[in-house]
Image: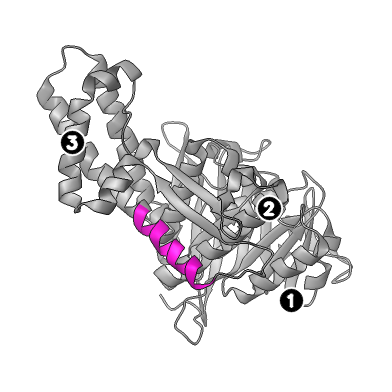
Amino acid sequence: MSEHCDATGLAIPLVRRLILSDFRSYPALDLSLGAKMIVVTGENGAGKTNLIEALSLFTPGRGLRRVELASCARAEGPGGFAVSIEIETGAERVQLGTGLVPRSEGGFARQYRIERAPVGSARSFADHLRIVWLTPAQDGLFAASPGERRRFLDRLVLCVDAEHGARVTVLERALRNRNRQLEDHYADSRWLDATEKEIAEIAVAVAAARVETVARLRRLIDESRDTITPFPWADLEIRGDLERLVGERPALEAEELYRGILRDNRRRDAAAGRALVGPQNSDLLVRHGPKQADAARSSTGEQKALLVGLVLAHARLVARATQTAPMILLDEIAAHFDASRRVALYEELAALPGQIWMTGAEASAFSGLADHADLLQVRPGLVGRLAHQSDRILPASDSTSDV
């Protein structure tokens, strides 16, 4: 693919057109974009987050809201939806599409298309686009459950390794299969042996991908530590028996050792109703680097700043690892920052090569970006420029080629 590239050869895909049909609050939208930085403002409930959620569907999974895709269909619509984007590729453009379409036998099926031709899954989009995001739901990440941090970690890995999500899904399915077999006291041990062999192979691959991504992220953070920035650096560590084993032993040896652990723990795991050792129980530990304190014990403001710093570092890692600058989606990013920290954030974002999308209720929080961004205002059924850029507010059903 011949994406727009910088002087270093880094691919910089830029979304130049977003088309929605029956998605969330939008019956129809055809939105053209000209800038690297996109700001979307409007009252709560107007449909700001819906725009960046639509973009997040071009990664494996269920998007930044992590909901069933059927709920993305417009309530008054026919039940399905479609999202299409055009990515700038220098003199050419590549079109990506996804959505839910009716099945002949009833219900809806997820579809994925590149240049209008069907592809097997969202993993194919990774050849054209990588996406990083931060939402208010993640603000409490450091004090949340290990499961939440584990999902966050897997999202970090997925942006670098597009196959990681599929491996995690296979692992979860194999673990459920083993649980069912352990519930059956008459199960053939040979079936358990085969299931545990599959689990060991895929679990070591999942753990190894996590270990490698965290190690690479730590190295990048160490290279670029800044004690002056308002977004402090994070000290990261994975806590998990299998991740520790993978870090100490070759993969094949780690698989054999983990198979032995599963075999020896069958009775205990049967009593617990789940496997007690494995990557499904791991945790991502985060410390406030400059203070060397647990992130969970930092103030709310410190945690938000630390999380932003971590996401920005991850975006730089994605660019380095994949040679593609990721698109960054930041929902309500300026809400809890004072004016000086907002200015610092915008400077950090401007230094990144990829396209940036930001949402916020208060247009005044983005006033300093008027000369550098597409500033859009969303109202129910309407999308247009902010008043100081254009006096015109365009219906969402219109072609907004001048927005």
Query: Disc 1 to disc 3, how far (Cα)?
Result: 55 Å
Element carrying mark 1: loop
Q: Which residue is mark 3?
A: 259
Q: Magenta segment, which residues?
A: 211-224
Determine the residue positioned at 48% across, 72% down: 223
User: Would you place residue 362 above or below residue 189 in this image?
Assistant: below
Is 215 covered by the magenta stretch?
yes
CA–CA distance in space, label 2 to label 3: 42 Å
Q: Quadrant of the C terminus?
A: bottom right
Q: Is residue 221 magenta?
A: yes
- Residue 107: x percent and y percent? 47, 32
Give residue 372's position: percent from left, percent from top: 74, 76
> Is label 2 in a helix, a strand or a loop?
helix
257 relative position to 238: left or right: left
Query: Mainly helix, strand or loop, the magenta region?
Result: helix
Which residue is under mark 2?
302
Q: Secondary structure at mark 3?
A: helix
Marks 2 and 3 in Cβ contact (< 8 Å): no
> What amino acid is at disc 2?
Glu
| Quadrant position of residue 360 | bottom right
The residue tagged 1 is 372
Residue occupying the point 60% across, 70% down: 226
Sequence-wise first label, 1 or 3: 3
